[in-house]
Each structure stands twice: as structure tokens, then as C-alpha cells.
């Protein structure tokens, strides 16, 4: 089979969400010709809901004994149910909103740079790259559930080695393997699927990564300040 025939067979297939793990370049080629949204979005939402359940379980594992909390077994069970349900509801609504907002931003940038791209293709790229970050969350939470560790610290982040708190801890937590992997794939996808130049693709991703670092630092500092106030 010739190289042309192989390329034709590749683009005739729809991109695979799980294929992003082992063959992202092939998925980018397929996505450029046949972007898909519905099934990948459903899988991403299911992954997010699994993450929500694990968050609830990890919170329970990390809590002090019931006697120290002054809670009965029934109260603790109710607290766990509320935690899981509320986290799942928040995840179910925030994940699509975040994907939509980021797609709108990238789509606007593409239009400003006069790059011809459909909204569907941009949304598809965002869904596929976001999946990698969610997988990382699930893996980390599964490990934390097994070892009953602190669910706020991802094992695949720099902060798992340093153990910092406040603004520094939040910033170090942002340097996380799956998050960085997702950002790299997004940069590659903006170039190969959407048509941005390599320089523009990496610049966009790095700028948003820096913005994320700033928000993380502010959030971490604010949380530390509130915790300090609660101690008085």
C-alpha cells in the first residue's frame, strides 16, 4: 500500500479519544478532516463524573476519625453523599462551559489572525486535549484513594516533591505531568489541525499557561489567608 493510500485511510476514519494517548499525530490528521464532538464529549463528561466520585471518596479517606469530628456514621454517610453529588453536579456543568469558553477564545484569535477554521473543529480539538488532563486527575485520585493521601496534592505535580502551601504550593501544583502533556498536545493541534503557525501555537499556549499560574498563585494565597483567619 502506498503512502498516499495510507494517508487516505487515516483521514477516512474518525479521530479516537483514546488514540490521543498513543498516536496523537494520527488523531490530528483525522480531526483535520473529520472533527467529532458528541461521543468524545460524552466520554469526557463520564470521566469527569468518575473524577467527582473519587474526589468524594478521597475527602472521606482524608478526614479525621468520626469520634474526632463528633459525627455519627449516618452523618458521615450523608456528608459523603452530598460531597459526591455536589462535586458531580459542578463538574457536569463546568466542564462543558470551560470547553466552550476556551473554544470561543481560540476561535476569536483564529479569526483575528484570519485563519479559516470551523467552530466544530476548534471545539473538537479542545475536547480531545482536555481528555488527557482529566485522565491525569483520575489516575492521581485513584492512587490517593488507595494510599489515603492528601487529595489536594497531585502525585504527578512538582508540589508532591516539595509539599509547599499557599501561593507557591498552588503554582508548583500547576506544573503537573498530565496538564503539561495536554498543553503540548494543544499547541501541536493548533498548528496541525487549526492552521496556526508553530510560533503562534506555542505562544498562545504558553500565554494561557502563565495566566493559569497567576490565577493559581492568587487562589493559593487567598486560601492560605482565609485558613489563617479561621485559626483566630
Image (cartoon, rainbow, N blue to C red):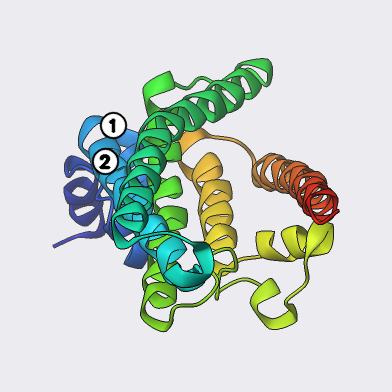
Could you say which is closer to the camera, residue 201 or residue 126? Answer: 126
Q: Where's residue 226, x and y in %?
A: 80, 47
Mark 2, residue position: 40
CA distance for labels 1 and 2: 6 Å
Residue 134 location, quadrant? bottom left
Counting the numbered discs, the total is 2
User: Dot 2 lies on which element?
Assistant: helix
Give the labeled residue for mark 1: 37
- Picture coordinates of residue 18 (x, y %)? 27, 57
Which of 172/230 is in front? Answer: 230
Task: Determine whether 222 is above or below 173 in the image.
Answer: above
- With 56 as the anchor, is 181 left or right in this view? right
Name the element at disc 1. Answer: loop
Residue at x-position 30% and y-position 48%: 81
On the rendered image, what quadrant is the N terminus found in? bottom left
Tell me which residue sits at (59%, 28%) in the image: 106
Tag 2: Cα neighbours inside 10 Å, few (<14), some, or many (≥20)? some
The answer to whether mark 1 and mark 2 are in CB contact below 8 A is yes
Give the numbered dot on residue 221: none
Amino acid at each position: 500500500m502506498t503512502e498516499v493510500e495510507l494517508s487516505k485511510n487515516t483521514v477516512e476514519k474518525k479521530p479516537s479519544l483514546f488514540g490521543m494517548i498513543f498516536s496523537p499525530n494520527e488523531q490530528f490528521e483525522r480531526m483535520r478532516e473529520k472533527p467529532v464532538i458528541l461521543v468524545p464529549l460524552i466520554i469526557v463528561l463520564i470521566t469527569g463524573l468518575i473524577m467527582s466520585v473519587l474526589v468524594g471518596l478521597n475527602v472521606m479517606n482524608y478526614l479525621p476519625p468520626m469520634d474526632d469530628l463528633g459525627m455519627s456514621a449516618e452523618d458521615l454517610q450523608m456528608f459523603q453523599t452530598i460531597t459526591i453529588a455536589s462535586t458531580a453536579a459542578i463538574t457536569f456543568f463546568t466542564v462543558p462551559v470551560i470547553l466552550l469558553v476556551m473554544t470561543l477564545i481560540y476561535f476569536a484569535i483564529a479569526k483575528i489572525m484570519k485563519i479559516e477554521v470551523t467552530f466544530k473543529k476548534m471545539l473538537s480539538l479542545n475536547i480531545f486535549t482536555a481528555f488527557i488532563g482529566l485522565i491525569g486527575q483520575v489516575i492521581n485520585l485513584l492512587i490517593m484513594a488507595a494510599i489515603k493521601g492528601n487529595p489536594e496534592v497531585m502525585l504527578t505535580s512538582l508540589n508532591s516533591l516539595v509539599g509547599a502551601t499557599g501561593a507557591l504550593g498552588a503554582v508548583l501544583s500547576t506544573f503537573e505531568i498530565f496538564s503539561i502533556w495536554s498543553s503540548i498536545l494543544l499547541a501541536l493541534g493548533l498548528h496541525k489541525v487549526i492552521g496556526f503557525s508553530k510560533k503562534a501555537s506555542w505562544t498562545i499556549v504558553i500565554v494561557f499557561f502563565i495566566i493559569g499560574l497567576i490565577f493559581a498563585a492568587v487562589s493559593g494565597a487567598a486560601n492560605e489567608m482565609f485558613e489563617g483567619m479561621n485559626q483566630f
